[in-house]
Image (spheres, rainbow, N blue to C red):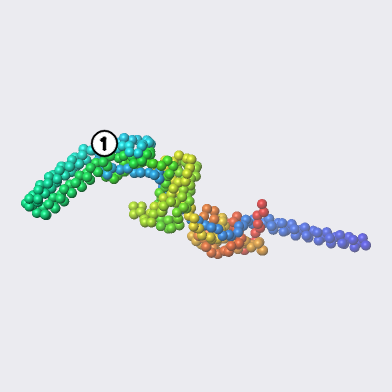
Amino acid sequence: MKKLFFITLTISGLLFSCKSNEKKEKVAVDTQLQTIEVATVESKNLTDQINASGVLVSKSELKLAFKTGGMIKRMYVSEGQSVAAGQLLAELDMSEIDAQVNQTKIGLQKAKRDFERVKKLYDDQAATQTNLQDATSGLELATETAAAAEFNRKLSKIFAPASGRILRKIAEQGELIVPFSPAIILGTGANAYILNVGLADKEIVKLKIGDKAAVQLDAYPYENFTAKVTQMAQTINPATGTFEVELEMLPTNKKLISGFVAKVNLQPSTSNNSLVLPITAVVEADAQNAFVYVFDSGSSKVSKKPVKIGKIYEDTVELISGLNSGDKIVTRGSGFVTDGEKVKLFNP
């Protein structure tokens, strides 16, 4: 009986020893497996953001110019100065302009005398109907010429069309200036500012009125501002080869000044729903062709799969083909595994 009990204990000990060894071997094997982290392939609304740059200007900014050219005789204002509606801001040297006005007045007086003389001759039947018509046309032409010269003389002075503040003086006293060239920029609004940016054709088609934009100003490097699209050009600007887009700055308590340089990140409201991958899952990428490792939870093995990828969006990349929604892909450790290798998941 004692012998039988001893044999039973011996067998039990052997069985326990075998199980213990198997457990130790399993633990040893597990410690040798590559540890990975996985993520799930999922769909996401992707938006193509558009980057551009521009210069801040006052929305109610008026560019004031002389209608005639000449030398600037006097500038009566300075930059930053507040002005009232109707205030004289600048004027040209009137010597040549006044001479032109006087010439037209002399021409008008002669045309009147000619008309009166021909009219009397016509009444006395000493002149023809054609002579009278020519004299009448000459008088009308001289009258219009004199009126135009007088009008140009008035526009040889710049008056403030509305109350506001002088944002910039483009020309200075003593300079020669050509007709219609802006000499003064007047701001009539306190808080309305806009940005004008030029976009390519493939960019402008993604936008619509009301789309938002994130704005960063060099003057406030750590501040974020918001703007919205208010106007979009329907034709290309031949000078720049781009389509002009106007963005209105939303109200802010920061001081804004025309001329601030801005970086703009436009955010189109239109988006497309696509499958995405974490960018860390992509290996051996070559343009659109790449590979990822797919994890099979049943066998705890990974398999290398070819995929086609699209655009990169921050930390994700668009998946064009190769995987399905819900597939598990290796994100951490993808550079240290091989096709068909057995792995273990990271448990934090």
Where is residue 8 drawn, in percent x and y? Answer: 87, 62
Q: Residues within 10 Å of mark 1 (few under 14, many from 20)?
A: some
Give the amino acid at mark 1. Lys
Pick the front one: 232 or 289: 232
Pick the front one: 12 or 199: 199
User: Which residue is outermost to the right?
Assistant: 1
Circle 1 sits on which residue? 73
Question: In the displayed structure, does residue 266 sit left or right of residue 6?
Answer: left
Question: In the displayed structure, does residue 303 sit left or right of residue 225?
Answer: right
The residue under the point 41% across, 42% down is 189
Q: Secondary structure at mark 1?
A: strand
Where is residue 6 drawn, in percent x and y? Answer: 89, 60
Pick the front one: 128 or 183: 128
The residue under the point 31% across, 37% down is 88
User: Which residue is outermost to the front?
Assistant: 123
Question: In the displayed structure, does residue 13 sit left or right of residue 250?
Answer: right
Q: Is residue 175 visible to us here?
A: no
Residue 108 picture quarter: top left
Residue 30 picture quarter: bottom right
Q: Is residue 288 visible to us here?
A: yes
Q: Is residue 290 above or below residue 66?
A: below
